[in-house]
Amino acid sequence: MRDHLERLVFVDETSLKTNMTKTHGWAPIGDRLIHHAPAGRWNTQTFIAGLRHDRIDATGIVNGAMDKDLFDLWVEGILAPTLRPGDVVILDNLPAHRSSVSADILREAGAWFLFLPKYSPDLNPPSRDIAAQYPDGQRSKWHSQS
């Protein structure tokens, strides 16, 4: 596979929630903090794409959080047409990715698909380093005691 990087497609998504706008902030002493935020239009938008070694492919933006139905639509309508037989689609463990409909679509396109292992901070050096800065009693449940 090292010689065929053009075959790899990493699928991931990220979302933006407008209700995460800060309601407080800092300003110089004596000055009022003035900043704008959307008023009453709280929503979530999700950006999803396939990352290849040389480009971002099959991009899509959906209103709302990703679920199996939206993921199936994205795979069928946007991702599958970009795939060639032998491509390898690598997915994380989002429950929406574990769809039998999407699996069938990927198989029909001639693509393989693999799931990444479950997240472990032990495999993620920045998370491990941040966790090491907290006293033992304050470490979150996701960080191992090393």
Image (cartoon, rainbow, N blue to C red):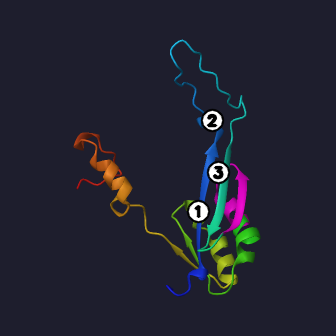
Q: Residue at x 57, y 15 (%)?
A: 31
Cα–Cα gap, marks 3 and 2: 14 Å
SS class of the residue under badge 3? loop
Q: Which residue is mark 3?
A: 65
Residue 57: % across, % down: 68, 69
Cα–Cα gap, marks 1 and 3: 13 Å
Q: Is residue 71 magenta?
A: yes
Q: Nearer the viewer, residue 139 or 106?
A: 139
Which one is in front in this view, the residue at disc 1 or the one at disc 3? 1
Q: Which residue is mark 2?
A: 19
Tell me which numbered mark, 1 or 3, is placed earlier along the sequence.
Answer: 1
Which numbered marker is on residue 12?
A: 1
Look at label 1 and name its amino acid.
Answer: Asp
Residue 105: % across, % down: 69, 77
Numbered range of the magenta stretch: 56-73
Furthest toward the top, the residue is 30
